[in-house]
Image: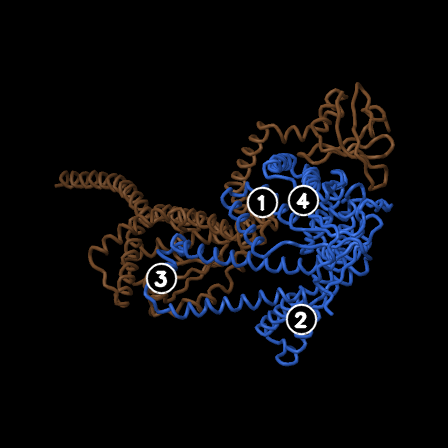
Chain colours: A blue, B brown
Amino acid sequence: MDNFNQTPEVSNAETFEFTGNGWEYFKIWIVNLLLTIITFGIYGAWAKVRTNRYFYGNTKLNSKSFDYLATPIMILKGRIIAVGVLILVSVLNQFYPIAGIGLMLLLACAFPWVLWRSIKFNLRMTSYRNVRFAFKGELGRMYWIMFINFLFPIVIAGLVGGVLYFLNGFDTDEMLAKNSSIMLMAFIITAYILFPFIQKLFSEYYLSHAAFGQGQFNTHLSTWHFYKPYLIVVISSILIMSAFALVTVLVKDNSAIKALMMSFEPQHGAPPDVGKILPFILGIYAFMILLFIWLNAFIRVKIRDHIMPNTHLDNSLSFLSKMTVGSLTLLNITNLLILVFTLGLGMAWVAVRSARYEINHTSVYSHGDLSEYVNEQLEHQNSLGDELGEAFDIDMDLAV
Amino acid sequence: MIKAQGEYYPKDSAACQQVCLQFQGDDYYLLINDSVFEQGQTDQLIITDRVGNIPRRVQLNNGGEFSTEDNDAIDLALKGTSKQKKSLNLLHNLESHWGWISASVVFCIVFVVLTVGWGIPAASSWVAMKLPASVAQKLGDGSLETMDKLWLKPTKIDETKQAEITQRFNELRQQLSAFDSAIKDYNFNLHFREMRSLPNAFALPSGDVIVTDELVKISQNQHQLDSILLHEIAHVVHRHSMKQAVRGAAFTILLSLYLGDVSGVAEMLIAIPVLLMESSYSREHETESDEYALKMMIEMGIDPIHFADIMNAMTRSIEKKRASEKDSSNEKITLENKSKDNEEQQDLDKVFDYFSSHPITETRIDKAKELSIKFRSEQCKLMNRKDVNLLLLTKHCMTKENNNL
């Protein structure tokens, strides 16, 4: 029997609610921007705390809001350390390149640890009705996931290299260049093929070890349900590209198209006239952007639809996603238009709309009483993990 | 007395009760069902900053927490207390004051415009010029090979002619190095190619300059070709391609940082603004190269009119080629339509000028003609002086002869 995607028995259904609005957030956002610029980024720590407090504080379940508990000083400390490490790496690279490379390798090995600390920090700084969340996952598992993520494609690329060496040899420069690019392709293709699996591993790891007070989250995910949406997207893309190619072949001999193509050439000793190319390029871009948004929405909704119903808090709470591909696509398209027509100033409204959509389309089904949960005592964790993660641009994508 | 309704959570518990927090004088009183449950001094309370209208949390003496939606009541209660408490709301006051909001909007817009309009381009140019010439060399490596595969064909110009032009090219470089010492840093190479019977020339950052067969054909004298070669040399010396690359990268990174991962299309969206910016900068590059070429021509004593002439020749040649291609597709163009097309074309040209990567050819030709007039009048002045001296000398000789006679 298929245990997945079953709607849990409905007892008490509650939908999350987002109570913020664009104007209110815009005021916070623009002052954040002003002060961050003036202070060369130092105010950024305060800006981050205010932003998160605004979004968490306006997220309500059962009329009670969430809280973001980190203080600006915590964030600032972490950022200062991150910048310090960056400077150290730059200086070393300049004067002692070998040491510089060594340090960078060390940082690469520390990356899973930083990510792990980041997750722990963020969850511990989140609370609902005075009870904090927590993350209890083991560091070893994080390393294992990262290992598969990075080293597996390297191994495959190495194997491909071995085969090539056997077939062609690496003697000439040309052979070396050709073989290297094939190996690189192998690496990239393997990484892409692996991606949904890594996403599943990571989601599982994160959700199975998240805790709310004394309660433990648990989840049961299927790898196939992660691959399915991506496969559909890839096949659709191939079909669409083929349709395009077909159209191109059919109109190749059309004189109007030929005249159009001529205008793309370099003229009068200058680069091609962008003025003539622009409408053409814009048209193609517009189509690709719409397609891209739609495909992205498709993947996000399908994966969310799989993760949420299969995630529970102890045996008391289950979750449900009410997002649809159509409405999410529409949201993202309108967000994009807002950004374009406000030349980026509309960012605040875009953030609020996205949050409102996501939060208002998530529901909780409960059997017991939330109030029973009590805060669990955790050892004091500093903010190091969180901000190191940020400075080196680590993005955590849970697709939820 | 100030009252605020809200919820009370005992320490480390999620159970809550509806309560009322009252402020009177310097004290606070927590009332549950109208009986005082907890009290203390307002100064002892730890209150969170106000952010918009999110619930305000107040930590009481006993470690319990009071949470209320009534931010205004809390603000009022804080008004009477010590300065320390008042500063909690500084940020919220900034965020509520329309004056500050407007100032912030103006400041941010000005900052962005300055950074994008001046800061980044200036920094990119500086970086591009500071890099050693060998980096520029590497940038162009392989480009010519790619172009040979895609649109260029081997030249049909005979070897003696090629040698002649290459000789002239090297002469120009020699002469230029007197006016611009940077020339010596680059390894220039002149190449000849056939490109679909169109006249054209371009330069790669590596110092490779390519001229097409048709361009050589339509140039009526050496100086016309000179002006084109000088223009291309200018591109290399000013490192236009490198500046473009650095600038494009800088814009892309900044835009990415700002947009984050908003609609999931940030990556695609970024290319368009970057492309738009780059096309207007390309125009500047072209103008800069024109100015360099014209300036050097004047320094070397070559009439700028030759630049105008070759531009005209190229325009005629390209239009002829376009017309012949249209004919070969069996499209009938009546005379009326043709003149209408030209007008429309000129209007379209003007509209696209902003988006265009090269300044309109008319403008370039006019500029060259202007400088030519100046050049000639300068020459005339010089000639006149020479002529006067010659006249005086002749007169002197003649007088002398007369005297001898």
Residue of label 1: A350
Instruction: Tell me the element at label 4.
Output: strand
Q: Which residue is mark 3?
A: A262
- Say which label, 4 or 2, has the lower sequence index: 4
The residue that disc 2 covers is A157
Query: Viewed as shown, does residue A272 lie left or right of B222?
Result: right
Q: How far apart are labels 2 and 1 at the CA level?
A: 41 Å
Closer to viewer: mark 1 or mark 3: 1
Q: Are marks 2 and 3 on the same chain?
A: yes
Q: Do the numbered discs 2 and 3 sit on residues whose CB atoms are within 8 Å?
A: no
Callout 2 environment at 10 Å: few (<14), some (14 to 19), or many (20+)?
Answer: many
Mark 3 residue type: Met
Report x, y in % for residue B136: 52, 56
Q: Residues within 10 Å of mark 4 (few under 14, many from 20)?
A: many
Element carrying mark 1: helix
Q: Secondary structure at mark 2?
A: helix
Q: Quadrant of residue A319?
A: bottom right
Point out the tag, 1 or 3, that comes first from the N-terminus: 3
Q: Quadrant of the N terminus of chain A?
A: bottom right
